[in-house]
Structure formats: C-alpha cells, structure tokens
Amino acid sequence: MEVNHAEAGRQVAAATSRIAMLKPVYAAPHPLAGGKVQLSVFDRAAIDTYVPIVLAYPAPAPSNEALKEGLLRAIAPYPHLLGRFALDAHGRRVLHLNNEGVLVIEADVPADLADVLAAGGMTTDVDGFYPSVPDPEESIGAALLQVKLSRYRCGGLLLGVICHHHIADGHAASTFYGAWATAVREGKGFIVPSPFIDRAATAVPRRTPKPVFDHRSIEFKGGEGSGSSQSDALLPMDKIKNITVNFTAEFMAELRSRVGARCSTFQCLLAHVWKKMTAARGLSPEEFTQVRVAVNCRGRANPPVSMDFFGNMVLWAFPRLQVRDVLGLSYGGVVGAIRDAAARIDDEYVQSFVDFGGVADANGEELEATSTCGTMLCPDVEVDSWLGFRFHQLDFGTGPPSAFLPAGLPVEGMMVFVPSRTVKGSVDLFMALAEDHVAPFNKICYSLDDILPSRM
C-alpha cells in the first residue's frame, strides 16, 4: 500500500483525539509490582529509542473498545510494559514496575481510509499515524508502550504502536502483539500467557567474570577500537532517505540459484543487498565494509533461555570484507562470510558478553549502545530480519492487516527485511540511505550481475 502524504497530513490535522492511560486491575498484585529492575546488559546494548509500527485494517475493523479490552487482558503478565523508566541512586536508568499504564490515543478522522492508502507500493513515511516518539532525555516517566487508534469514517483503522527498545527486542515485541491479537479475538475466553520475565536470570556473570572479547569496542561506545569501521559520523535526519524495495519470489529463486548452496532467504538477500549498497556508495576497493547482523541469543546461551523470554537478548555478528571482495566474490562466497560470522556468536561469546556487563556494573560504568539516531554507518550496514515475525498476520478478529508499515529508520545504512503483505512469498526491504546513494542503488538493486570496483 502507498500513503497519500498530502491527504494524510490534512486528515491528521483535522482529527479529533482522546487520550487515556489504561491500567489492568489485578485481583492480586503482580509479584513484581512496585519493584525496580535493573536494565540487563542486553537491554543497554539496544538502541535507546522507541520502535514504531503501523497496521492498516479496512472496514469492518475491530472496535476501539475490543482493542482496549484485549490490550488490558494481554498486558497483565507483562509488568515491564506498564512501568516507567526511573533513575537509581547512581543516576543509571532502571525499570520502575509501578503499573502506571499504557498511553492510548483515540483519533476520529473525517475521511476514508482509502484516501490515505492506495494500491501500488509501500512507504515508510507514516509520521502522525503513531504517538510522537519521545526524545531519549524525555523518556524518564514516559509511557513505555503507547498506542494510537485512528478511526476513519468508513470504519477503517490505522493502528500505530511504539514500544521502547530497552523493554523488548523484536522477538519479544512480536510475541506480545500476537498475544494482544489473540486476546481481542477470544475475548473472555482468552487464556493469559505466562511469559518468562526474569531479566536478571538471562545475564548471570560467572563467579569470577572472564570477558574474553572486547565488548567495550564491539557492542558499546568508548573502547579503543570500534564495533564498526566507521567513526560514528552524524548525518542530518533530512539527509537520510527511507526507501522500500520489493523482492519477488521469482527474483529470490534466481538469487538462490546464483548462491549455489543451501541458504536462508535472509542470507541470500543480505548478500545481494550488501553487494548493491557497496556499489552504490562508490567505496574504494581497499576499504573494509561490514554488516551488523542481529542474532537472537536465546537458543545460543548455555543454558538456553526460553523463547518466551520477554526482554532483550540480541547480540550482533559482524561479517567483514574488503570492498573488492564484497563486489568480486560470488554470491556463495559472501553468504559464507555472513554464515561464518553468525556462527561465532556462540555460548562462549554470550557468556563473555554477560561477564563484561557484570564487570561494568561492579565498576559503576556507563554503557552507551553503538547505534544512535542520526548515525551514518557508511561504509557499514546494519540489518534486522523480521522475516520470522508475524506483524503482517496480526488478526484482531476481522482478518490480517491490509498494510504493515514500520516507521522511518533513523540510522543511515540500517535496513529491515519484512514478509510482504501484498504478494505471498515476496519480501519487502525497508532501508535508510544517504540521499546521494539512493539513485545509484535504485538503478542496480534488481541486477544480479556482478559490479566490480573500478580500481581493482
């Protein structure tokens, strides 16, 4: 679906809104009620911002009351989503599980949903369809989960949600949104889930912590080295352009044939896009480029952590090659580099990271994640795969959404792979590029021909 931006802007301005803070009523206080929970080292490695998504539901869409009632049923076992950030005695951010609630905005829009959504593509420009994202310095005391229900006169609905990344990674967030959809569909018959929510249990240092890897330079800022080969250059947000590319099932079948070996959809597409982004950026053949690949560590820890753990448990693999190799190697060669880097995020690496966090806490050290809004990653890339998440299938009782739209990405070089809502078996790529690189990328993004560097 494509957003009619001018019409959307007029409608947002004309909409009338109601704001409320929703809180579940517990028959007995939640066992964690009132407590203050330290952010884990995994939480602090995540980018310090809210993650927005927007879902479009044509009429007949679920009612606002059904959505709110289902939200209250689903969220009861997730006290972290109902809490607020606070500061401890050392000035460090903690989670105060004070049941302050979820911010819900209801907007009546005097137009039809069809005036906003039109067939013919996708967009990431969905500002105004979700609650305003607080700046990091404004997040203390702000609701950590916020919802906007934009009801159109035709009965259609735009559902916009923002959730702070320090509360949940993509896997955890998608699990919660799935529980919310189920609660709306099943009503009073909904069986409340029992997620694993003990953050401290996922990050237990050894009795004598022994960090083996240089995590200060990999996952956090402040080390002598750097987790990326760029220097954290900042780029004005208006110079970061978000684009969307659709890869059809036929394109991916041809791409797999070029790889010549078994590989996942994610690995194949990442190898392809890495090649094309590198070419579009016009980098020197001798320069190094790497990809920051999100890796779910629940199953890689020893002992493994339950997949229903609600929180953050993601680290990153860093396949790294010279530009000449990214462009000159076969697709199979680049896929192999990606696969080898991901394999290095094993139980030893996870425990080393946890031990590093334990040492940092004991020393009272501040930890700042490497990704911040407005960062320019070039010559590097950061990627998240939402291919295993079911955002595009969230059914609140009237069928799946007609459009699923993540918001604009705030970091140049960041990209997200999402299952296409419009064409079964295809994949949508949402990505942020410096404006000077957009035209060269669009020109070659569907080409499977190798582009060799000019100064090999």
Image (cartoon, grey):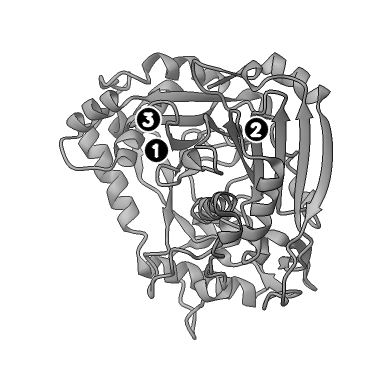
Q: Which residue is mark 3?
A: 273
Q: Is residue 351 above or below residue 258?
A: below
Q: Marks 3 and 2: in contact by CB < 8 Å?
A: no
Q: Which residue is mark 1?
A: 288
Q: Amino acid at mark 1?
A: Phe
First in sequence, mark 2 or 1: give its number.
2
- What is the C-alpha distance between the residues marked 2 and 1? 42 Å
Is disc 3 placed on a helix, strand or loop?
A: helix
First in sequence, mark 3 or 1: give its number.
3
Which residue sits at x=37%, y=70%?
348
Q: Is residue 93 above or below residue 320?
A: below
Q: Residue furthest left?
A: 260
Q: Residue furthest bottom?
A: 207
Of residues 123 and 390, the one nearer the viewer is 390
Which residue sits at x=54%, y=38%?
398
Q: Amino acid at mark 2?
A: Leu
Classify 10 Å Cα crowding around label 3: few (below 14), some (14-19), many (20 and above).
some
Classify 10 Å Cα crowding around label 2: few (below 14), some (14-19), many (20 and above).
many
**Residue 11 picture location, percent across and down:** 76, 21
What number of labels is visible? 3
Classify 10 Å Cα crowding around label 1: few (below 14), some (14-19), many (20 and above).
some
